[in-house]
Amino acid sequence: MRHTGAGLFARIRQYAGGLRIVRTPHSLAVPYALDALDPDETRRFERHLETCPRCTDEVRALAADTVRLASAASVPAPPDLRERILTAVRATEQEAPEPEPEPGADSSARGGRDAPSRARTRRRAGARVLVALAASATALALVAAGILAFALIRADDRLDEERASAREIAHVLAAPDARAADARDARGRGLGVVASRSLRQAVVTASGLGAPSGGRAHQLWEVRAGAPPRSLGLLDGETPVVADDLDARATSLAVTVEPAGGSGRPTTPPVVQLTLESVGFGE
Amino acid sequence: MDADELLPLVARGDQKAFEELYGLVSGPVYGLVRRVLRDREQSEEVAQEVLLELWRTAARFDPARGTALAWILTLAHRRAVDRVRSARAAGERERREAERAVRAERTERAVRAERTERTERAERAVRAESPALDQVAEEVGGGPEREETGEGGLEREWVRRCLERLTDLQHQAVTLAYYDGYTYREVARRLSLPLGTVKSRMRDGLTRLRDCMGATA
């Protein structure tokens, strides 16, 4: 058989349905495995992969090579990264294995990228808290898990305000110098805090306080020597409070029972108090 | 347990399994990201993103498509490469902006002279900016963090030795792409080689690496 160059091209094109589309992708397996394609080429090659078992095998084999290249670069991660990640993990919802059908109407209106994240937020965070508590590790993890689980539940029900607060909380938790502490008395009343000295912020949660009687309120205070306590706001049950502009010299946080709406200064002795020394404040 | 056994547990929310997995993959993930990005702070940030994403999206892992380690390191590599490329693109935009300003002010001739000089300077910079592999390995692996021993350490050493056995072009093609995050088109430009040649140098390099490693995996 004899082919002219043009005849051969035509045959290939006919057979493959377009020379450019088919011939290039095969040869792109190696740069693809090295992540060395530009975005367009990557998309094109991934489409091609779906219809090319041979390429899929090849890519899998090449992945073993790139794993070696990656492993050769291995260096121990900074020690504090571990604590940060594990803390964040205890507070971070996972994507559901399968997309959960949503009774709500808005999931179809949103982009594909957004939909799974909503599904994730909507999964029952309560179960996750129990897992987190059962896995009981450091104080930071426990405190953070409680805080985030709460934030997630709220983000479920409420709107932008709650989401903003969840973001703020996540921001404090992710600070490189985030430290946690908590304290609880014999009656199970306690305060937990995750604080960042560099941000001068803290996420504070109270637990076991119950609702004060007679329409009164729980008020949170920043305490430091030589200055009157500064109000950090009223507590709403166990909802985490983000305290801003903390004084580096603050020695503790305290909660008192105050008349509805709060007071300018504490009018009763603290119900619970937590020192801030271990979280980097108060020198 | 290895990563392939741990990842499905992680996908079901097992935090202990995640801790164990962290122990296995944090070094390779951080090392790889650091290798691509160089900058310590950015690397920490990206590694953190990747490891959290690993937790969040563990359910997406499909064992039919490869090993867990490959999945994880691919995730890490893509994030690092995305980051380094967008940083480069921003730098490029700035350069072009500056060039436009210069052009507006100067005569045609002055611009031409300037541009020649700048090209030369850029070329010198490019040469200076891509140090030899060993040098980078030294720099990244050095310091107080370096204390790792054991099986993983041995394999790493082995890979590094095998990399040294590639020809210069194979070595450059593979490392410019994988460790420095350049696309194969950029690699071709930097090495002044045709695209086809770059692709085959990459392929040959990986094949030789595989052979040298004994192709046990």
Image (cartoon, coloured by chain):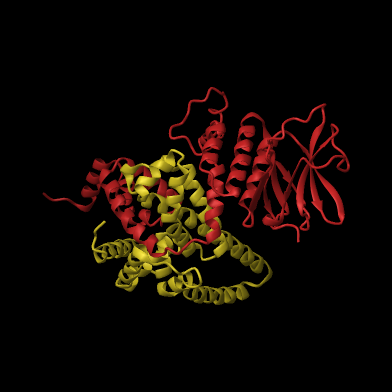
Q: Quadrant of residue A30?
A: bottom left
- Kindly indicate which chain is depicted in yellow in the rendered structure: B
Q: Camera-side residue: A273 or A219?
A: A273
Q: Position of residue B191 (x, y in %)?
A: 40, 69
Residue B48 can be seen in this image = yes
Q: Position of residue A243 (x, y in %)?
A: 74, 46
A114 vs A46, left or right, is right
Q: Camera-side residue: B161 or A216?
A: A216
Q: Residue at x 86, y 56 (%)?
A: A226
Residue A13 can be seen in this image = no
Q: Camera-side residue: A43 or A70?
A: A70
Residue that protrudes farthest toward the left in the picture: A1
- Kindly indicate which chain is depicted in red in the rendered structure: A
Q: Residue at x 43, y 40 (%)?
A: B11
Q: Residue at x 39, y 41 (%)?
A: B8
The quarter of the picture where the C terminus of chain A appears is: bottom right
Tally of numbered discs: 0
Q: Is residue A182 above or below residue A198?
A: above
Q: Quadrant of residue B24?
A: bottom left
Residue that protrudes farthest toward the front in the picture: A186
Q: Position of residue A19 (x, y in %)?
A: 30, 47
Q: Residue at x 67, y 56 (%)?
A: A278
